[in-house]
């Protein structure tokens, strides 16, 4: 837990946690010393010896423990605030260094949960968990050492109890940890299904599905219920074992004290004080047993946050390589797979000249979208080279690479901001005239004219206030405004109606005047004017050429074209 907290704070702030833990250890030791000093006080009272010096020592230790406790509490508050203030900054700084392929739906869902719960969880660690945890270790160890000074046999008995208690706590901790991990997985799955159920109400209602008829959600809720019951049973067993171990340790120590008293080794009054000290040894351990569940849950959440920070950043050079061929795209012998044993691209090679329009066509699953992702460096290739602007993408900084690219995807995400702000994302410093021209070319000006607040209209989270085609126009306007040397369009026409498709074609012609355009298209009538068409099949480029040349070659492209044109002639007829 302490290691994970240090990681969240970062090297420059880790000293805050170190100081807090040091003060907490000091408090635990002083509280154990103060408890141990009660024995000589009782012994002096029982024997009639002067008790003043012992009382003075006890008072000094008690006051010191109180002062240290105050400082420790203040340090804990400061450490909690420091961690809370740096948590999201540390996460944000690290997330931007991860490869874009890391952000799949599962990881994003888990990240959302731990990041939103992280603030309260970290506050709880400093306020309620870390201090008892440290004191529960420091104080009993101090009492154990003190008992050796009173009687070596009692000290030895106490020392022998420590490993047995450690084994019991380890067993309880593992039981709780397994349950906590299962709970977390079940909660994430149930939460994802609830969000899915809410987002897809139109589809579900169209087919008469309510919450009692949506099997994935029902299964997730049932699994969550069964998991919690299973976790509860495991937790009860673990906590019972640890609690029983503490009680057995106390019983053993009491029996040893009674034996020493009957043997005459200690006076009866001192024996009573030693029994009280035995309880002082066991008290923090009992508290630790009670806190075990909360500690494991908090430790699990903390570990998941720390695991995000432990994800290796995408390697990036200190200086970007010079761009020897601006606007050029090259893939040379690329081999890549999302799983190492299942390659998607197998010796893929393609050369896209600067200022040209190149279309990637082919059957679904051939690897076309993977090419776009490798150019954007979502992942790094297993072998081969991907060059953008004449330089290997691995030898360019993220800033230098993204400055060359403008991307338009089939699934467009718009931020919950104004229409203008979403377009300006392409180039925030652009003039109003440039924004208006990009909007005109993409057909967004027609949308602006009929919106109630024009440019100041908020589009909603994800762009819910606009249709799919309208969101695509905004995305095209971004690309036009950025004026990047290379534009990548990933199936941008797949779900467009004829009107939106007309705007897209006009935009592509505009983009081609100053950028290299690489587009993926399933509608072959959208690529007939491309300078180069590359047919992709089974992870390789099997044909390249113009529309006319590929039709004359009567190969893979010609077969795709015949299938496309024959499909457009289908009619529904009676009989």
Image (cartoon, grey):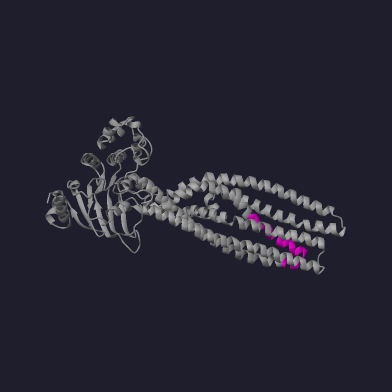
Does residue 401 sit above or below 347 in this rendering?
above
Magenta segment: does it hold 144?
yes
Horizontally, is 138 left or right of 368 in the view?
Answer: right
Name the spot of residue 23 as percent of width and height, x first. Answer: 65, 51
Is residue 332 among the parts visible in the rendering?
Answer: yes
Between residues 495 and 515, which one lies in front from this camera angle?
Answer: 495
The span shown in magenta is 134-156
Between residues 245 and 205, which one lies in front from this camera angle?
Answer: 205
Horizontally, is 505 left or right of 5 in the view?
Answer: left
Please give the name of the residue rendered at 66% of the width and 64% of the height, measured from the top-left corner: 162
Name the spot of residue 53 as percent of width and height, x first. Answer: 83, 53
Please give the name of the residue rendered at 71% of the width and 62% of the height, measured from the top-left corner: 144
Between residues 475 and 268, which one lies in front from this camera angle?
Answer: 268
- Residue at the bottom extreme of this rendering: 263
Name the spot of residue 100 as percent of width and height, x first. Answer: 38, 51
Figure quadrant of the N terminus: bottom right
Horizontally, is 194 left or right of 328 in the view?
Answer: right
Name the spot of residue 292 as percent of width and height, x first. Answer: 58, 57
């Amino acid at each position: 837990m302490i290691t994970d907290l240090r990681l969240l704070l970062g090297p420059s702030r880790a000293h805050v946690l170190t100081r807090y833990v040091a003060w907490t250890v000091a408090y635990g030791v002083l509280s154990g010393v103060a408890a141990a000093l009660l024995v000589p006080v009782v012994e002096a009272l029982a024997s009639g010896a002067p008790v003043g010096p012992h009382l003075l020592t006890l008072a000094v230790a008690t006051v010191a423990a109180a002062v240290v406790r105050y400082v420790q509490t203040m340090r804990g508050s400061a450490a909690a605030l420091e961690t809370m203030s740096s948590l999201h900054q540390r996460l944000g700084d690290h997330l931007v260094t991860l490869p874009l392929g890391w952000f799949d739906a599962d990881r994003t869902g888990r990240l959302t949960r731990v990041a939103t719960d992280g603030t309260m969880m970290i506050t709880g660690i400093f306020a309620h968990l870390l201090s008892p945890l440290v004191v529960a270790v420091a104080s009993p160890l101090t009492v154990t050492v003190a008992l050796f000074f009173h009687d070596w046999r009692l000290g030895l008995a106490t020392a022998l109890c420590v490993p047995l208690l450690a084994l019991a706590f380890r067993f309880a901790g593992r039981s709780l940890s397994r349950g906590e991990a299962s709970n977390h997985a079940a909660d994430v799955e149930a939460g994802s299904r609830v969000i899915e159920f809410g987002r897809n109400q139109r589809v579900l209602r169209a087919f008469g599905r309510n919450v009692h008829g949506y099997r994935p959600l029902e299964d997730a809720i049932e699994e969550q219920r069964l998991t919690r019951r299973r976790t509860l049973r495991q937790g009860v067993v673990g906590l019972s074992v640890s609690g029983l171990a503490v009680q057995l340790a106390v019983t053993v120590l009491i029996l040893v004290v009674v034996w020493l008293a009957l043997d005459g080794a200690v006076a009866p009054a001192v024996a009573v004080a030693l029994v009280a000290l035995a309880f002082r040894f066991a008290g923090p351990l009992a508290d630790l047993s009670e806190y075990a569940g909360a500690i494991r849950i908090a430790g699990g959440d903390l570990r998941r946050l720390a695991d995000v920070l432990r994800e290796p950043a995408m390697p990036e050079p200190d200086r970007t390589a010079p761009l020897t061929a601006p606007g050029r795209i090259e893939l040379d012998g690329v081999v890549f797979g999302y799983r190492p044993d299942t390659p998607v691209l197998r010796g893929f090679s393609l050369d896209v000249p600067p200022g040209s329009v190149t279309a990637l066509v082919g059957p679904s699953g051939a690897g076309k979208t993977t090419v776009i992702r490798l150019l954007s460096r979502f992942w790094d290739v297993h072998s081969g080279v991907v060059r953008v602007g004449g330089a290997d993408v691995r030898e360019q900084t993220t800033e230098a690479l993204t400055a060359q690219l403008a991307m338009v995807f089939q699934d467009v995400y718009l931020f919950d901001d104004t229409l203008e702000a979403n377009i300006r994302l392409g180039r925030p410093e652009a003039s109003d005239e440039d924004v208006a021209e990009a909007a005109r070319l993409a057909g967004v000006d027609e949308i602006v004219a009929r919106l109630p607040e024009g440019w100041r209209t908020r589009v909603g989270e994800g762009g819910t206030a606009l249709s799919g085609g309208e969101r695509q126009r905004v995305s095209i306007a971004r690309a036009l405004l950025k004026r990047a040397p290379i534009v990548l369009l990933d199936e941008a026409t797949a779900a467009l109606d004829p009107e939106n498709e007309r705007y897209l074609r006009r935009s592509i012609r505009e983009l081609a005047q100053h950028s290299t355009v690489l587009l993926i298209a399933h509608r072959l009538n959208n690529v007939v004017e491309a300078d180069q068409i590359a047919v992709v099949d089974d992870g390789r480029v099997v044909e390249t050429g113009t529309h006319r040349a590929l039709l004359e070659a009567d190969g893979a492209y010609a077969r795709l074209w015949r299938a496309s044109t024959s499909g457009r002639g289908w009619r529904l007829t009676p009989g």
